[in-house]
Image (spheres, rainbow, N blue to C red):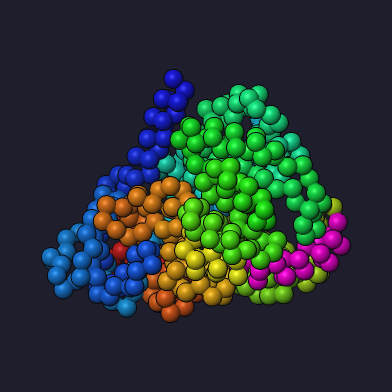
Amino acid sequence: MRIGTCLAGAAAALLALAAGPAGAERLTFQHVTLIDGTGAPPRRDMTVVVEDGRFVELIPTARAAPPTGRVIEGRGKYLIPGLIDIHIHLAGSAAGAMPGGGPTVDRQAALEALASYLYAGVTTVLDVGNNPDNILPMRADERAGRILAPHIFATGNLVTYPGSHGTGMAVNVERWPEARAALQAQFDSQHPDVQKITYDDEGWGARPLIPILPRDLLQHIIEFYNDHGVRTTVHISNESRAREAIFSGVDSLAHTPAQGPVTDAFVKLLAAKRIPVASTVTIGDNYGRVHDHAEFLDQPLYVATMRADQRAELKRIAAAGGETALRGSPELFRRSWRLYWQTQTPILQDNLRRIDAAGGIVAAGTDASNGGATHRELELLAQAGIPPLRVLRIATLNGARLLGRQEEMGSIAEGKIADAVLLDADPVADIGNTKRIVLVMKAGAIVDESRLPLSGGPQRRRYDPGR
């Protein structure tokens, strides 16, 4: 009965995702350059028709029938799929939330963070670890159309071993089969879209060693969720643990190994098994970037999506040398953590370049809670030497693959959910042009930025529907 009920719930969620907004209008983009997210070369002077929340026709404009419904002139513009961030932790609750308790949820902070993604052209997010009282109501409200937000996928609580990475926001289990009851309770109450497990004994950077989930228990957990129709993703930080997780049956990696250069054998393993890996370069890059180049916070995207006092406080911390405490020691943060990531980030970038070049599936994820971070992730991937056209695939179709939703979303193709971003500059020439947003469309509806509850205050609508 439980499995049947949950499968019915999963089917209902898919229908909610696929359906466009009530009364979604017919839209025709004409004379647009189409970059479909598959890695195929751009197609110029195309007509793209959207109806009932789906892409229904892609055709050269010269061959298209006279348009009906609203027409959007695309000369000099570029249509890409909506961006996907497959590793976020939504703001609105402290990280130490325990199952069944924890801090008061700040709903407004969560709504503002979600608005930042839509404003940045991110139409789908996967939250991979949060206070369920924060993320799950947001997921329900988004699917019911009650809030302005990207498509939300979520794990709810993590699963790990007591004292291991993320233990404070996790269902903690110690042995099998005793763990089954706790996992079933989490599944029944939270209906995770993807389940995140942590498998990391740390001991790197400024972190001491901690307990780790036993490998046999890891395999049981993966099998449990797969038997319930749920894909799994695992937090790792090095190649050794990543290999163990892959051979235990995990469906994706929530990070790419960053502790050192990965071996050629590992690169080939990822390509052979088609295991998607989240990029998550931004989270380490931020430590040095805020310290050395805090002026990035004055970019329009951050001004719109962060409060002025938040940006000022980050600049103050940067000017002071990095006062944010790590495990109670500001000195440790200043002297170790920032320097560690300044060393390791180029290594992580090169790991990602090699994985992508070998045919592995890299998917864009930030480990953050702001749409601006997604664009920084794309910049870092391009700086790693990954061609912009492939970076766009990493930020769209590959994210859908990690979710197991590539048949429904992630690229511009007939029959798929109509998530897209219209740009006024070529992102293949410069990946930074993904920030040159004319309009954002989610499930066939053009986002009205003036209605978004953005932290930086009200913003004007970028696309005038009266034109």
Which of these two is toward me, 429 or 227?
227
Residue 435: in magenta span: no
- Name the quadrant of the C terminus: bottom left
Whether residue 2 is visible here, answered yes or no, is: yes
Residue 276 percent coordinates (x, y):
51, 54
Return the residue found at the far front.
265
Segment tinted magenta in the rendering: 329-349
Residue 345: in magenta span: yes
Left or right placement of residue 196 versus residue 207 in this view:
left
- Name the quadrant of the N terminus: top left
- Which of the 4 quarters of the picture holds residue 334? bottom right
Q: Total marks drawn?
A: 0
Residue at 53 percent across and 61 percent down: it is 268
- Which of the 4 quarters of the picture holds residue 398? bottom left
Q: Is residue 327 above or below residue 312?
A: above
Q: Is residue 135 above or below residue 175?
A: below
